[in-house]
Image: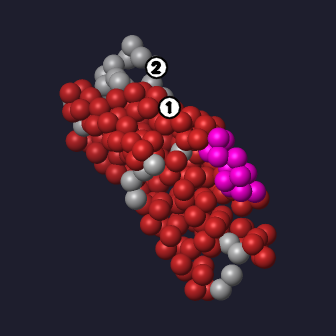
Amino acid sequence: MTIEAVLSLALFAFASSITPGPNNLMLLASGANFGFLKSIPHMAGVAIGFGILMISVGLGLGALLTAVPVLHLALKFAGAAYLLYLAFRIATSGSMADREKPRRAMTFLEASAFQWVNPKAWTMALTAIVVYTPADALGATLAIAVLTFLALNFPCIALWTSFGTVLKRFLGTSARLRVFNISMGLLLVASVVPMVLD
């Protein structure tokens, strides 16, 4: 892979990692509700889970989904259903003062598993493999692509979580936090609409 190709891949990795999507919206909400430290397993799960997804797509899973469209359709609707569940979970989160409901940040395993039903993650992985990894040198370029994404993805998602942590100061009242959580839930629902209509 040439230096120009790596730079182009890095620009794609940065642009796709920093822009709003299900992962970033959930990490923003996690930072606001639980703080940065308690959101670290969630962030690590996103980064590592996406890396594993990328490797799987590069090793042939993407071709399988293209060859068997019903699998792609099933994945699409499973992803939409799970995103709606997560949107509901975020929107109905209790306030910081609410001790009746057990509240916790998403775990490493939950965040890793979510990448498999996250439509933006699939789009990013498929694009990175198809556009930036030539088939004749897949092993080396796949490793470079995954490492490039890991190097750029984690700081981007950490930034979104940090934004949430900063917002936490302004969401000190139960009413403000409730409005924020409902807004994040609605934005997550809005991110499902283009996927279902596509």
Tell which of 29 and 39 is nearer to you: 29
Q: Amino acid at mark 1?
A: Ala
- Please identify the quadrant where the N terminus is shown: bottom right
Determine crowd level at label 2: few under 14, some 14-19, many 20+ residues with C-alpha closer than 10 A: few
Instruction: Report if residue 108 lies within the magenta region.
Output: no
Q: Residue at x 37, y 37 (%)?
A: 189
* Marker disc for residue 143: none
Front tag of 2 and 1: 1
Q: Which residue is mark 2?
A: 102
Q: How far across and down, in percent of the image, does residue 98 sit?
A: 33, 19
Q: In x, y percent, where is residue 109?
A: 63, 37
Please tell me which residue is depicted at 52% across the width and 67% down the height of the picture: 13
Q: Which residue is mark 1?
A: 81
Asked if the stretch drawn in magenta spans residue 64, the answer is: yes
Residue 24 placement (x, y as % from top left)? 43, 49
Q: On the rendered structure, is 181 left or right of 170?
A: right
Amino acid found under the numbered disc labelled 2: Pro
Residue 144 found in image quarter:
bottom right
Compared across the picture, whether 177 is left or right of 146 comes to left
The prevailing secondary structure element of the residues shown in magenta is: helix
